[in-house]
Image (cartoon, rainbow, N blue to C red):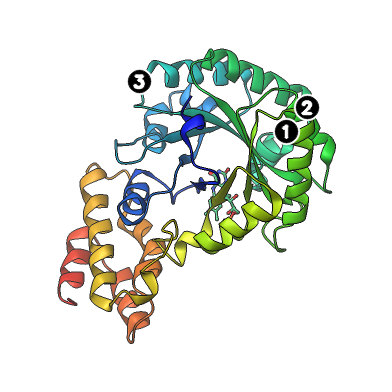
Amino acid sequence: MFYNDLPKPFFVMAPMDDVTDTVFRQIVASCAPPDLFFTEFVNVDGLQSPGRPHLLKKLQNTDKERPLIAQLWGLKPENFYEVSKQIVSGEFGEFAGIDLNMGCPAKGEVQNGACSALMNNRELAAEIIQATQQGAAGVLPVSVKTRLGFHEIDPTWHEFLLQFKLNMLTIHGRTKREMSKVPAHWDEIGKVRELRDALSPETLLVGNGDVTSHAHGLELASQYRLDGIMVGRGIFHDPFLFAVNSPWQDQSKQQRIELYTKHVKLFANTWQHGEHPVHVLNKFCKIYINGFDGAKEMREQLMAAKNTDELLHLLASEV
Ligand SMILES: Cc1cc2nc3c(=O)[nH]c(=O)nc-3n(C[C@H](O)[C@H](O)[C@H](O)COP(=O)(O)O)c2cc1C
């Protein structure tokens, strides 16, 4: 099992929908790879419907993003079973494991009864975990990513999850109600680690929320005795965040433009059939075109580009 080969603590790049696709994962891997990657969450009910071709891009991957965990969400246990079997079969590429999203607080998903709403429907949560474990058939590890609770911090939820002998449990240190509005409660993540020690010592415990650098992650892992640290939005401020010593602060305007150019070229080569419109790149522009005089004006110009050729032309004129 690849989990045995991970360093302690290990660093995980968080799943972020419409952000951490194969293109961005490859860029991060080229800067400073984490120990573990996640896909964006992908809906199993959609994958087992006529909408499947549209969703497959969320599972697209290359050998540069390894090890890679597929993150799933949905409602129907039979679809978790089928999709897990498909992942095991290798038809989507090489995956190291399957993760179940039980933490997303988005209105649509919660009203449907999926993701964080599963904290309030443990019967269905159990069926989903068991269906996935059966589909993964002991071949791939199964993990869960969740929060501290729904309205309130709720240790009974973590106790419940730890019965399933998950390979890994990731805790985002906020409740569903808190969305992302308050600082992550790392002390509460530490309490879940204590529960893990008592109930399922084999389950790796990963903490997540507001980590800003590799050193910050190491500090939290040591303080709360965690196996791993997951980082999401921190990467927006430093694409080299997973490096022990990030060079990002010292990178010149030219280096930053070159990195964005690399991202745009990879985007253009990967999505050749209009899978994503060019404006999808705008959310990445601020990562790179930042930290030098005139960056704001340059971003405004770049964000108005109508296609990747125009964007690349503008970038080339700046170096
Ligand atoms: C734009 C965006 C998309 C996200 N999409 C997902 C997702 O697909 N699956 C998931 O489990 N969490 C998702 N999250 C939550 C992150 O994985 C992470 O738990 C959260 O951002 C807190 O970590 P951070 O403070 O390091 O960003 C998303 C967060 C953001 C900001």
- Counting residues from the start of the chain, the first of labels 2 and 3 encountered is 3
Pinpoint residue 78: horizontal percent, then vertical percent.
59, 15
Q: Is residue 122 left or right of residue 216?
A: right
Q: Is residue 61 left or right of residue 126?
A: left
- Counting residues from the start of the chain, the first of labels 3 and 1 encountered is 3
Residue toward you, 98 or 113 = 98
Residue toward you, 101 or 52 = 101
Pinpoint residue 257: horizontal percent, then vertical percent.
25, 70
Q: Which residue is mark 2?
A: 122
Residue 91 disc label = 3
Say what secondary structure mark 3 lies in: loop
Q: Amino acid at mark 1?
A: Leu
Q: Is residue 67 left or right of residue 226?
A: left
Give the answer, above or below, for where 16 lies relative to 246.
above
Residue at 34% from the left image edge and 80% from the top image edge: 295
Q: Residues within 10 Å of mark 2 (few under 14, many from 20)?
A: some
Say what secondary structure mark 2 lies in: helix
- Marks 2 and 3 sit apart, C-alpha to C-alpha, by 31 Å
Q: Which residue is mark 1?
A: 118
Image quadrant in which you'd find residue 278: bottom left
Looking at the image, do the residues carrying marks 2 and 3 touch, with CB atoms under 8 Å apart? no
Looking at the image, do the residues carrying marks 2 and 1 touch, with CB atoms under 8 Å apart? yes
Say what secondary structure mark 1 lies in: helix
Pinpoint residue 224: horizontal percent, then vertical percent.
70, 51
- Marks 2 and 1 sit apart, C-alpha to C-alpha, by 6 Å
Q: Amino acid at mark 2?
A: Arg
